[in-house]
Image: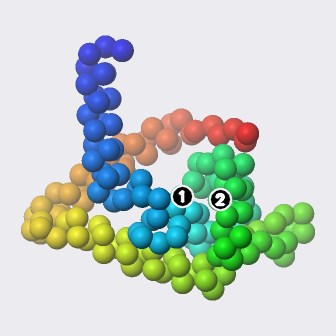
Amino acid sequence: MNPAAHDLAERLRAFNRFFTERIGALDDQHEGLDVTLGESRLLFTIRELGAPHPGEVADRLDLDLAYTSRLLGRLDDRQLIERSVSATDRRQRVVELTAGGRRLLATIERRSNARVLDLVDHLDPPQLDELTSAMSTIQNLLASREQKQPKRRENT
């Protein structure tokens, strides 16, 4: 790796470490609750997709299907989701949030919103505009690569 590429990689990784620490991504209990960040993302995605089958959840999050199934199993064990046979295709199983899953997700979202707003409460409106513009730029630049080269995920 040439020195410029090495420096770029180090800067990107330093930013990732900075941001993941700020948002609590490495905490065992996401937002102080009995749920991991990965499980929170599954709950959010299940709600977003309606009644998806596990493969749809894995695809949306770009996760391995076996890992997704393990996470779903943990959520099912805690009665945060329920699995059932699809009404449109009896060969498929779908997952949906239970009432407890919906309540937990609402709590996660309230706490997550409070956390990120706390991160920026010291910024004035022009700085907030600058921050959101930079975030949009990052998303657009990284998404353009994904559109050119979709990731390939293997089921292990």
Q: Mark 2 falls on what kind of element?
A: helix
Q: How many residues crowd mark 2 within 10 Å: few (<14), some (14–19), many (20+)?
A: some
Residue pictured at 73% horizontal, 39% vertical: 156
Residue 117: quarter of image: bottom left
Give the Cα distance between marks 1 and 2: 8 Å
Most foreground residue, 50 or 108 = 108
Q: Residue at (63%, 86%) from the top-left corner? A: 99
Residue 20 drawn at (x, y percent) = 35, 51
Q: Nearer the viewer, residue 19 or 141?
A: 19
Amino acid at the residue labelled 2: Leu
Taking the image as shown, residue 71 lies to the left or right of residue 134, namely: right
The residue that appears at 65% across and 59% down in the rendered structure is 71
Question: Which label number is shown at residue 71?
Answer: 2
Q: Quadrant of residue 103?
A: bottom right
Q: Which residue is mark 1?
A: 38
Residue 94 appears left or right of 35: right
**Do tag 1 and tag 2 residues touch (Cβ < 8 Å)?**
yes
Number of on-image labels = 2
Task: Inspect this view and state whether residue 32 appears.
Answer: yes
Q: Position of residue 95 (x, y in %)?
A: 72, 70
Q: Is residue 94 above or below residue 106?
A: above
The mark nearer the N terminus, 1 or 2, is: 1
Given residues 35 and 146, the one toward you in this image is 35
